[in-house]
Image (cartoon, rainbow, N blue to C red):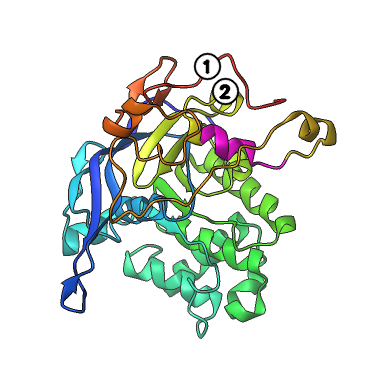
Amino acid sequence: MKSSGEAIVQLRGLEMIYGQRRRIFGRGTGQVHAVDGVSLEIRQGETLGLVGESGCGKSTLARCVVRLEEPTGGQILFDGEDITHLRSGSLRSFRRKMQLVFQDPFASLNPRKRIGATLEAALQIHGIGGDAAGRKSRVLELLGHVGLSEEAAERLPSELSGGQRQRVGIARALSVGPRLIVADEPVSALDVSVQAGILNLLKSLQAELGLTMLFISHDLGVVRHVSDRVGVMYLGKLVEIGPADPFYRAPLHPYSLALLSAVPLPDPDARDESRQIVLEGDVPSAKSPPSGCRFHTRCPYAQDKCRKIEPQLADHGDGRFAACHFPLDRAATVGPS
């Protein structure tokens, strides 16, 4: 997986705020800053892995990128075009360029439609494949691309395994010829024995079709397998981003270090040498985030400055950025690599 270096997607100060839609006992429930001022680029041909604990905003960011949600602030640029507030017909034509692979492969498929009909519907909506015979031929080609037999076209989702259903989800995403695939926890609902097959499929399709990918996951072990660069989110903020190899060897942000220390290691000797960092306390509420650095309430290295001043994403060279007043020593490693 190699990137040309040209940005296909640019997020500039992206915000998604949910606020005061309900009232309880006469009072508003407050605003939730799900994504709060995130700026990043996704480069042509690369896989950017985005990680963080549940509730950090990574899935909301993914839904904003493909415009299933309309951001409340900031900009989304695709090939330099502002798509933040596209409407109706313009939005439909744009959707051919970006497609989403969902977390739950069963919930994302119509249980009453046969697989062939599901795939053909996407082609028909976007006017791809010509007549019925052409669309059917394209459906069989897509099934072959994702490692499924032609017989799968006549089956219902309930007649397929979880891994097979996710392959159908990938085929549906590929059906309209997108340039960007946004994969939101695409293997978290699958058995561990099936996950590797789906990850290898995504990698091979990316190389074969020249795809760009945003890969969302809470599992850093999975992200390491597929990503060229890794971004880390915490409480709606991007706290670190950079190339995968140096990130996994020596992260800059204390939160990244804590996440990496929890990744299981297959080598028993390596497990003995590594030390897991247990973060104290719960993740603060996105309705009332802490002042200063949002991670300071759980950070073992926090100082007074961290409680008062919010750190900005700073350039640390070699394509690495971190939002931390006291970044970790780059010579220090997480453990055996």
Q: Residue at x 40, y 17 (%)?
A: 316
Residue 317 at x, y percent in the picture? 41, 14
Look at discs 2 and 1 and give the one toward the viewer: 1
Under mark 2, the amino acid is Ala
Q: Residues within 10 Å of mark 2 (few under 14, many from 20)?
A: many
Image quarter hosting the N terminus: top right
Secondary structure under tag 2 reads loop
Q: Residue at x 15, y 77 (%)?
A: 26
First in sequence: mark 2 vs mark 1:
2
Total labels: the figure holds 2
Residue 218 at x, y percent in the picture? 53, 49
**Residue 45 visible within the image:** yes
Q: Which residue is mark 1?
A: 329
Q: Residues within 10 Å of mark 1 (few under 14, many from 20)?
A: few
- Magenta stretch: dominant SS? helix
- Vertically, is 209 above or below 123? above
Give residue 242's quadrant in the image. Answer: top left
Q: Which residue is mark 2?
A: 250
Most distant residue in the bottom direction: 112
Q: Are marks 2 and 1 in contact (CB under 8 Å)?
A: yes
Left or right, 52 with reference to 248: left
Residue 211 at x, y percent in the picture? 46, 42
- Vertically, is 88 above or below 96? below
* Span shown in magenta: 256-264
- Vertically, is 304 above or below 94? above
Secondary structure under tag 1 reads loop
Q: Residue at x 50, y 74 (%)?
A: 107
- Residues 128 and 103: in front is 103
Q: Is residue 65 magenta?
A: no
Under mark 1, the amino acid is Asp
